[in-house]
Structures are given as structure tokens and as C-alpha cells.
Image (cartoon, coloured by chain):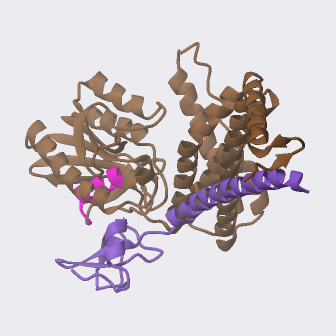
Chain colours: A brown, B purple
Amino acid sequence: MQPVSLMGGSLPDWISAVSQLIFLVIFVLLFLGANQRLQVYVWKGDIRSKLSMIEWMAAGARRKAREYIVKNRGSDVDTLLERTIDFFIIEPVNIEPIDIIKRLDHLFNVRRLRFKEFFKDAMKDVSEVVRSRAEVAIEIAAALNYIYKVVRHLLMYGEKTKNWVLIMQLQLLMPAILQQAQTLWKAQDYFIKGVPIGDGAGPLVVYRLAGPEARWVDVDDETVAAEVEFEGRRLVLVKAKGPASSVGRPGHAVEKIVEDLIARGSKPALLLTIDAALKLEGEETGSIAEGVGAAIGDPGPEKIRFERVAAENGIPLRAIAIKMSEEEAITAMNEKVYKGVEKAVERARKIILEETRPGDIAVVVGVGNTAGIGQ
Amino acid sequence: MEGQVMPYWLQALLLIVSLAGIIYLTIKQAREVSRVMESQKPPRIITEVKCGDEIIKRDFQEGDYVGGPSAECEGGRVVGIYAVAESQQGEQKGRRKPLLP
């Protein structure tokens, strides 16, 4: 058998020549950064595919929010969406920390009252509960829209400035960003239906401590309190007003209650806060931990009120945390969290019995979103 | 004519490799999208109603809330609402009747 002759050379000679040429071209391209360009091209493709999923979720969330408002006889829905979906809060100046909490609190109050007005105008004939659900539905749509816009911005900016490090970082972050977007997307349905979420564990513990016969009274905006007796102690229980989707203003409410009690000569012997807490990977959902301090995850204005009122009056500030993941905190309360609530009720009773005496007053606060949990 | 044998062979190989790569990436992408869709399947939500000393479990109905009334019995009250874990939900497939204590 003679080797096949091709233009004067044999087939093996040609294969060898072409292979060497390809190798040489690849070698030169490596020096010119072609490998990086190819890698960036793959990363960009991956980011774009995930970005299209986020875009789809953002559009879906907006559509669902719109449908819910229309279904509940909302008027001028497009204007409402337009005004609320890109609504922002500018952080107060922090290089001058004096009265920063007061300024932050003021901004949050203005935002809260503005939103209430927006929704009252658009949904006149419905209950506060329905309005609160519409508000959260739009907040979730706004959050997804924001995630979409930020990722798109980073991708486009990375492309424009040929910043492959930025694109690489974004590609590495995309799974976590996508997971967060998915969580928000799933959460919207539960808020619209009024299903209690994991973050409602704190209010549910307080509801259990109060029992179904407790008489609840409004103490602050969207915040209620009840007084019950437990083993000779007076318990003042505080939670957001349900079953609307609200976290209330527990710090403001507790400040008022404690100051009122002290003015009447009955200083509380214990201030106990109960909240959902983000677990570390590997920790069991629904497990309980206790500690000192204010168990509340707000940016400051509520938390500082617990700390100030406790420190100024020498009241022990105790905390119970019910562990869960971020996804579990904002989606339907699962069975593990639900069982954690029972454990937290027992732990709260134990702390009250151990740290107060008969005749004492203990203020117990269930911190968290009380969606689907009434009183 | 014989000079065209090698380019055809190389082209075919390149084509097969490229196609395999595209198919692999497409399947990978499709799996990712289906995973997102899969995670959207809602879990079963259970409502616990207290009737006297008894706790009745049933599927969640819109309008239920903890502390709210329930039509299961006179004076019935919703005492808990939670989602059933996915593994448990899998075991219960095919029998979506109300859970009885």
C-alpha cells in the first residue's frame, strides 16, 4: 500500500504540517489573549442566559402585582406601578453621625406614609390587609427589577470598558444572584395569598404565648400589644398587627410601653425579643439559640430603641433566635420552622420563669413580618 | 480529486465536535431553566384548626390566617399554617385528601 499522495506530499506529511500550523496559530493566539477573549465570551453567554431568567421573573412579578391590584378593584394601576417600582431612599449623611438614627427614622416614616397614601388612592374600597399584600407584591417586583437592572448594568459596563475581571466576578456571582431572585419570585405568591412566612416565627411565638383569648390593643402604627398572666407574672406581648403583611414598629411600641409602665411605677423585669435569624450553612432549620441584645434585623431606628430603653432603665435585654435560611425566611413557613416556633415558646417560658419573680412584668416582643398571623 | 479527501474529513470532524458542544451547552442551559421552573412548583400548605381539644389539619384556603375563624366547627380557630416539606410531599403524592390527626 502506497501512502496517498497530495500535491506532491503524502497524507501523514500533510496531517503533520496542518497540526503544526494549528499548534503555532494557537500558540501565537495565546500570547495575543485569545484564550481570555474566548473565556469572556463564554462568561458573557452564561451571564446573559441567567439575566434573561431574571428579566422573565421581574416581568412576571410585575404582572402578578398588577393582576392582584386590578382584581381588588385598583384604579390607575399603571401610575401606581410607575411611581412605586423605582421608589428609592437616599441614605442620610453618615460622616456626621449625630442624630443619624433620627434622620433615618424620619426618612423611613416619610417613605412608609407616602406608600400608604399611594395605595389608599389606588385601592380605596379594600381592607388594609389587601392593601398591605399589594404593597409587598410591588416591593418584590421592584426588588427583582432592581436586581435585573444592576446585573444588566454591570454586564454592559464590563463589555463597554472591556473589563474582563468585572465580567468574571459577575459570572461567579450569578448563581447566588439568581438564587436570590428565585426566592423573591417564589415569595410573591405566598404574600399575595396571605400564607405566613418563615420570618413570621417571632409574631407566631408571641401569639402562642398570648393564647386565643388575649385582648390586643393598638400601641403604635401597625403594632399591637396584649397583657396576659403567666405563672404569677404579667406578660406584655407585642407584635405587628396581622394578618396584614407588616413588621410594625416594635421599637417605637416597646419604648412607649416601657416608659408608660415606668411612669406608673412598674418597671419591667425583663425585655425579651424573639425573631427569625439567618442560619449558617450546616445549621438545622428551626433550631433555637438564645442570647442578649435586641433580636431584630432593621437598619437601626427600631433596634436602637430596644437598646436605649433597656440600657437607660437597667432592664435585662434578652433574645431568642429561630434559625432558618434566607429563602425559608421569606417563603411559606415550613414544618421545621413551625416546630421551631413551639421550641421557642417553651424557651421563652423558661427564660421568663428563671429571670423574673411572681408579680414581675416581662415585655415579650415577636419581631418579624406577621403576614397570615392575626391576633 | 484525491486532494479534497483530507479537508472533508477535517471539516466533518470539526462539524461533529462543534455540534456536540452546542448540543451539550443547550442541554445544560435547558436543565438550568427547567430547574428554575421546577423550584416554582408550590409546596402543599396545611392549615391547623382547633376544634375544642382537637386539632384538624386540612389544605390551606385563601383567607385563612392564624387566629382567624374557621368553618370546620363552631368556634373553630386557625392555630397554625405551614408548608409541608418536599420529601413528605413526595410520599403523599396521589392522596391529596385532607390530613386527619
- The residue drawn where x is 15% and y is 43% is A352
Q: Residue furthest front?
A: A1
- The residue drawn where x is 56% and y is 66% is A127
Q: x, y percentage for residue A304?
A: 41, 28
Q: x, y percentage for residue A345?
A: 21, 53
Q: Is residue A163 left or right of residue A202?
A: right
In-front residue for pair A44/A101: A44
In-front residue for pair A119/A71: A71
- The residue drawn where x is 66% and y is 73% is A71
In-front residue for pair A217/A45: A45
Residue B49 lies in the magenta-colored region:
no
Q: x, y percentage for residue B26?
A: 66, 59
Q: Is residue A254 left or right of residue A178?
A: left
- The span picked out in magenta is A201-212
Q: Is residue B69 left or right of residue A23?
A: left
**Image quarter in which the N terminus of chain B is found:** bottom right
Q: x, y percentage for residue B87?
A: 33, 67
Q: Quadrant of residue A90?
A: top right
Q: Quadrant of residue A53?
A: bottom right
Magenta stretch secondary structure, dominant: helix
Relative to A141, residue A271 above or below: above
Q: Quadrant of residue A136?
A: bottom right
- The residue drawn where x is 66% and y is 46% is A46
In-front residue for pair A110/A88: A88
